[in-house]
Image (cartoon, helix red, strand yellow):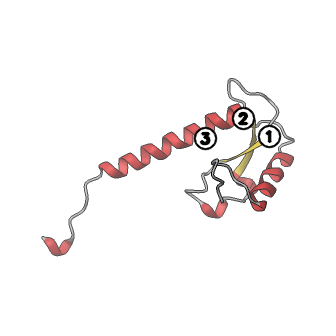
Amino acid sequence: MWDSDGSRNNAAHKAWRVEVLDRDGWSCQLQHRHCEGRANEAHHLVRPAVRPDLEYDPGNGVAACPSCHKVETQKQATEARRVSNARARRPREQHPGLS
């Protein structure tokens, strides 16, 4: 469940986050250009909006520092917008009964 500030704030998410961070030794696994090294966030590899069944699967997460997490989240948002825009441009099929 999302909080009003856009963050996850429930026991299941907190447990998932700690499990991912512990597994990865609290070290950022993304290693982007401005990586801070020390991770304190967990990043979903596949967005929960795409695969809700993987939301709390530790295999669907990696430890991330705030800088790298922001980069990855922006990439995912850009891809989601691209897919959504492509769907919107697709011509609507005419109902067979209207031919």
The dot on residue 40 is 1
Crowding at label 2, few (<14), some or many (≥20) Cα neighbours within 10 Å? some
Q: What's the mark number on residue 25? A: none
Q: Residue furthest top?
A: 33
Check if mark 1's residue and mark 2's residue have beta carbons within 8 Å. yes
Mark 1 vs 2, N-terminal side: 1
Residues 18 and 30: in front is: 18
Q: Residue lying furthest left in this view?
A: 99
CA separation, marks 2 and 3?
10 Å
Q: Quadrant of the N terminus?
A: bottom right
The x, y position of residue 83, in whole percent, is 43, 48
Q: Which residue is mark 3?
A: 73
Q: Amino acid at mark 1?
A: Asn
Please state which amino acid type lies under the numbered disc 3. Answer: Thr
Relative to 19, 7 lies left or right: left
- Mark sitting earlier along the chain (1/3): 1
Real-space Cα distance between discs 1 and 3? Answer: 15 Å
Give the residue at mark 2: 66
Which type of secondary structure does the marked residue at label 1 adopt?
loop
Q: Is residue 48 left or right of residue 65?
A: left
Q: Residue at x 60, y 52 (%)?
A: 47
Could you say whether the residue bearing mark 2 is in a helix, strand or loop?
helix
State which tag comes first along the sequence, 2 or 3.
2
